[in-house]
Image (cartoon, rainbow, N blue to C red):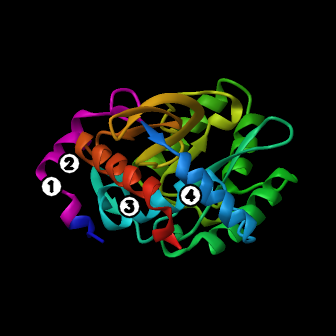
Amino acid sequence: METSDQLNTSWRKVASTIYRKPVDSKIFGGVEFDVTELESFISQKRKEGIKITLTHFFVLAIARIVKEQIPEFNSYLRRGKIVARPTINPAVSVLKADGAMSSVVVPSADSMNYSCLEEYMNEEILKTRKGGENGTMQNKNTLAKIPWPFRNWFFSVFKTLTITWGISFPGLGVSANSFGSFMITNIGSLGLDYGFPALLPTANYSFVYVMGGIQKKPVVVNDEIVIRRMMSGSIVFDHRIADAAQGAKLFKGLKYAVKHPEEFL
């Protein structure tokens, strides 16, 4: 894994100056994956007692790809400098029973296998859906109680101290890594086929990855038109931290992972 000094190239220093998050520092991209065999693999694992889903797969695959191929994505901007994170901690969005959105952070996801990831994520998601609140949700609730316009002023100061200056507040559960390294969200489960997310202003996410819906489509396989189950995937990432080349590496790695899910056993 690269160090902070290695990540701070001349262009990265310039990018951190000319772009401002999240107004004009975003790059979007998207692809489609043939998940026909991947769904069969997941179905077989579930029969064996490992209750994974497509979300588990993408969390593990993206964490491994970031570790092995794209260390730039495991960093954040603090005081005009790119800082490497010590561990890869994806945040996974969770839809609660009352319709509110929350998230769970998976610490060191790249070091897990399917079984460990399934056990940890399912337990944390269950806690969240039963009403458990992590630091992120507690801070949101606190902010919501402040009347306008004081809420805007408070958030501006809070963002400057935590996001821009990188000051941690352990008592509030807020630090550069408290919200996770990056976000993964499954909008396909909500009935959306495709979508591009926003970079959460209260978190130092380098990117947000979106799992879209799955549809049967005619595709060409071995020069023949066949019906396959196709899934969209899209990303938005902070242009101050990475470029389109890093996004392309992620999609290239995912295309390989979708075809070889057994390598993450």
* Vertical position of residue 155 compared to residue 93: above or below: above
Q: Position of residue 119 (x, y in %)?
A: 72, 70
Q: Is residue 12 magenta?
A: yes
**Disc 1 to disc 3, how far (Cα)?**
21 Å
1 and 4 marks in contact (CB < 8 Å): no
Pick whichever, 231 or 6, lies toward us.
231
Pick whichever, 142 or 263, lies toward us.
263
Q: Earlier in the sequence, mark 1 or mark 4?
A: 1
Q: Which residue is mark 4?
A: 57
**Disc 1 to disc 4, how far (Cα)?**
32 Å
Q: Which mark is residue 12?
A: 2
Q: Is residue 241 visible?
A: no
Amino acid type indicated by mark 3: Ile
Q: Which residue is mark 1?
A: 9
Q: Position of residue 107 (x, y in %)?
A: 57, 69
Q: Earlier in the sequence, mark 3 or mark 2?
A: 2
Badge 2 local density, few (<14 within 10 Å), some, or many (20+)? some
